[in-house]
Image: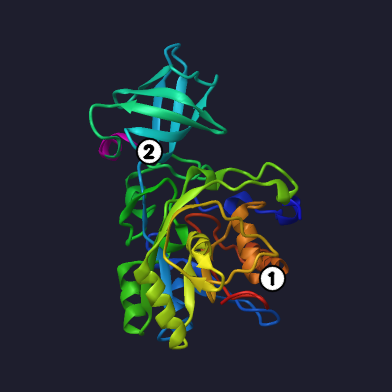
Amino acid sequence: MKKSDFHYELPPELIAQAPLPERSASRLLVVPPAPAPFVDGGIRDLPRLLQPGDLLVFNDTRVIPARLHGSKASGGRVEILIERLLPGDEARAQVGASKSPKPGSRIALDAGGEAEVLGRDGEFYRLRFHVGEALDAWLQHAGRLPLPPYIHREPGVDDDARYQTVFAREPGAVAAPTAGLHFDEALLGELKQRGIDFGHVTLHVGAGTFQPVRVDDLAEHRMHSEWLNVGAQLVEKVRHTRANGGRVVAIGTTVVRALESAMAGDELQPFAGETSIFILPGVRVRSIDALLTNFHLPESTLLMLVSAFAGKERIFAAYEHAVRERYRFFSYGDAMLLYPQAGQGA
């Protein structure tokens, strides 16, 4: 299977550059299994599309202000995007500079203090920060929100709230679990009143989520690693839902990655640790019955994941429909409700 198999043409003006005034105002494309037709609707249709006893699983990770700027001793400008916080005020990060900084060099940070370059691991650098306080606390007032690279503007005050889900509670992500951005308190209340249950996993989305697939032969691609936690309480909720005939609905591809990483055979088990799972057509998704997700970049691993679940031909037909109907794409864009193709799903 080739990366080029997952290419599609997207008019640039369909890439959402800002959120809508209301979270739940986004459109929703319902994609049932073929040959049923696609249904154009809105996120606010979810309460009637779901059933009492269904379980929605959200990712409760919280985006940290992970973007920093500074200068090398030579005066060259540097941009730092923290990928993961490490013990001892260290971090793994992407470092953008005209010339790669060498181990032992220091970067003077615009917000004060320094970042010492300890070494390099592939595309990431290991940095130690000297900022006068704990790194996680310092970032809250010194860092900037890391908007995705396809949003061509600087983050504003509104982004501090809107590029964060209303249920975010576990800091550690450098990108939002964007399917969750569509939910506001009113919609959550309506879903709860309908008899729909909620559960949470944590998967800290890393900067690697925006890294392009660099090989055309997908057998040679190596996924980035992300930390996740699927707790015993969530596992019990899933078992209870299944026992009572309800459906498990993942809110976003990060939830799918977390749940699939915690599967032992056909059983979900508590799990905390690293995952580098790569879900593409040919891999069975066993943990969910439906998936709410945004539209994904061409040739991305996330597009491969949704193609594994709903079928590549079905997904590409849905994307063609979405382009034709002028849906908004990517992080601040609209959403799809996907159902599994034959042989997929729990």
Task: Using the image, determine if residue 127 lies above or below residue 272.
Answer: above
Q: Which residues are magenta?
A: 137-144
- Amino acid beneath label 1: Arg
Mark closer to the chain start, 2 or 1: 2
SS for callout 1 = helix
- Residue 146's spot in the image, x, y percent? 42, 42
Q: Residue at x 31, y 72 (%)?
A: 186
282 relative position to 20: left or right: right
Colour convention of the picture? rainbow
Residue occupied by mark 2: 86
309 relative position to 4: left or right: left
Residue 309 part of the magenta-drawn span = no
23 relative position to 141: left or right: right
Q: Quadrant of residue 302?
A: bottom right
Q: Residue at x 53, y 44 (%)?
A: 208
Residue occupied by mark 1: 314
Q: Residue at x 49, y 65 (%)?
A: 259
Q: Residue furthest front?
A: 264
Residue placed most toward the observer, 151 or 169:
169
Which class describes the residues within 10 Å of circle 2: few (<14), some (14-19), or many (20+)? some
Q: Nearer the viewer, mark 2 or mark 1?
A: 2
- Amino acid beneath label 2: Leu
Q: Main secondary structure of the magenta part?
A: helix
